[in-house]
Amino acid sequence: MARTPRPVYTNHDKRTTLDDLAARVADGALVAVGGGLSSREPMALLRAMLRHGVKGLTVVGSAHGIDIDLLSGGGAISRSSESYVGFEQDFGMAPNYRRALESGIVSVDDSCCYTLVQQLRAAIQGLPFMPVRSVRGTSFLSLHPEYRQMVCPFTGEELLLVPAIEPDVALVHAQYGDAQGNLLIQGPPVADILFAKASRAVLATVEEIVPTERLSELGGVTIPYFYVTAVSEVPFGAHPTACYPLYAYDRRHTALYYEAARKGAGTFSVEYLSVFVHGVPDHADYLARIGGEKTRARLSSWCDGPEAWKRLYLDEAVA
Amino acid sequence: MTTGCTLGEMMIATLARTIEDGTLVFHGFGSPLIQLAMHVAKRTHAPRMVLVAGATYGVNPEPPFLAPTTNDWVMDRGASSSLAIGELFDLAAAGRMGRMFLSGLQIDRWGNCNVTALGYPNITLKLPGGGGGCNLSCDAAYVTLWTTAHRSPEDAKGQRRFRLVEDCDFITNLGHRTRDGRTAKELGHRGNGPQWLVTELGLFDFDAEGKARLIAVYPDTSIDEVLENTGFTPGLAAQVETIPAPERSVVELIRRLDPLKVHEKEIRAEDMRRGYAIA
């Protein structure tokens, strides 16, 4: 049975607090986390969700890293349908994610990027499924008994049908938005546009809320307002991932995170969660804890040129 | 003057040679050797190659340096356009992607790769996952496989955990043949599957049946060393050649492209000592 159509969100003013956004993510929800790898992850919102104690989430996505690892380490996930979760060659495998999935606390429901794209496209178009030619012959069929094979009635080709994925909520961090919820993403949108269109609700944080006319000057709207449920201005809301052009990837903080995570669940809880998540009442305190203005200046120095940009990633920069 | 090169640079040059001019080529994330191989190819023998960067989906970028992570604005500077995620995978599904590079913690003789989990379904080690590799292994016209961890030394119990294995615990990326013996061709996939496998011990192609065949070793590795470190018995070319060192200009190009030596993160410590004379 098809679910009721996704609503359009027509309020003129959707501005709210970060805590209110976090409170809107229900236990057990199917969640699409925007951004990708070390870029534009909605990290402040994820930290706020952990402070609220959200549980039992299923996460879907393409290529992810510290976002899903943090949710794993914070005990918020019960199923992972991600395509990749890791810190690339920079730091390696995702320690909290690995522990959670190997222990069975989180069930393994891995997917792959194009399969996910097609499943989101089905939801966007209001269709129950989409076909793919690939995947047949791999072990994903045993992991996903919901996939179905069919013979194409036009060509006789064997195809795989993958069901629509309609996330309960998409969590997106954009550079700019307006009060109505129009969002402007600068640089690679990764799967955020698909997530926004396929999800029942979109909760957005932005670096800055600006007048609608200003969005046009800055490059135009990437995600129209009526997809968006609520928006909150959260500067530095993607830290420690990058949100160019405002700030680069904080490799130094990520190294600190990774070291705590690598040592084990207990150490991660003491050295990271209780310092940077549960140990700070709100995002303002988090910003102070990560070094305030000094850190902001360091991470915005990338725009001084390639030499300054490189310095952010040199080993010497890692404390 | 540059008089020698490293194993990493040898592998980058070898990987670059697998790219044809005039084709659309894509890389994933966590693979600086491949990023560099593509930029080397574009600037040497394959100027008409359509280079699509992984994660940013930038087209023909000219990054000022290689960044430690893939989805960084560093990596799409100078790109003439950017693709949407769906658009890139549509190109492959429609048969327009010439080559993709894939790897795995397990790779079998047919070129199947496991990037999902060891011990599946009773998982002992959860791997990061293959991103879009599963789809692209079936759809890309050709695949180049690579690994920097072919060598599998014996552990304290005298056992080896092979990278090149008899069977993958989970097939994330499809090679030439599934576990139940169906070929990728019989399945009707668009792609022709793995064409090359580049490791830190040697270079393989795939025979008419789709089985890996050793065709070359490095000046400092041997056929015996390859066989000892391989979990299956690979075919051997009638004449196993020596992998040539890159030209000096290529080595210098790699060093300009990767001043932070990001690609060395892919190379094991014991392989950092290996060096080769260049002409």
Image (cartoon, rainbow, N blue to C red):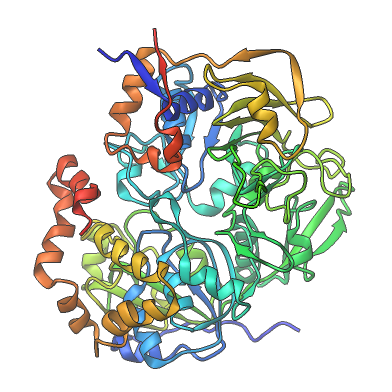
Q: Quadrant of the N terminus of chain B?
A: top left
Q: Is residue B239 left or right of residue A295?
A: right
Q: Percent from the top left, x then y, of residue B41?
A: 46, 23
**In which quadrant will I find the C terminus of chain B?**
top left
Q: Residue furthest top?
A: B279
| Rendered residue at 33%/39% (across/down) | B66
Which percent across, then down, holds residue A264?
A: 44, 74
Looking at this view, is B163 or B183 the one in front? B163
The structure residue drawn at horizontal position 30% and vertical position 69%, both measured from the top left corner, is A238
Tell me if residue A77 comes above or below residue A117 in the rendering. Answer: below
Residue B264, image quadrant: top left
- The spot of residue B268 in percent (x, y) is 46, 40
**Quadrant of residue B24 within the rendered picture:** top right
Quick check: B60 above or below B75?
A: above
Q: Residue at x 31, y 78 (%)?
A: A271
The reply, left or right, for residue A158 in relation to residue B85 is: right
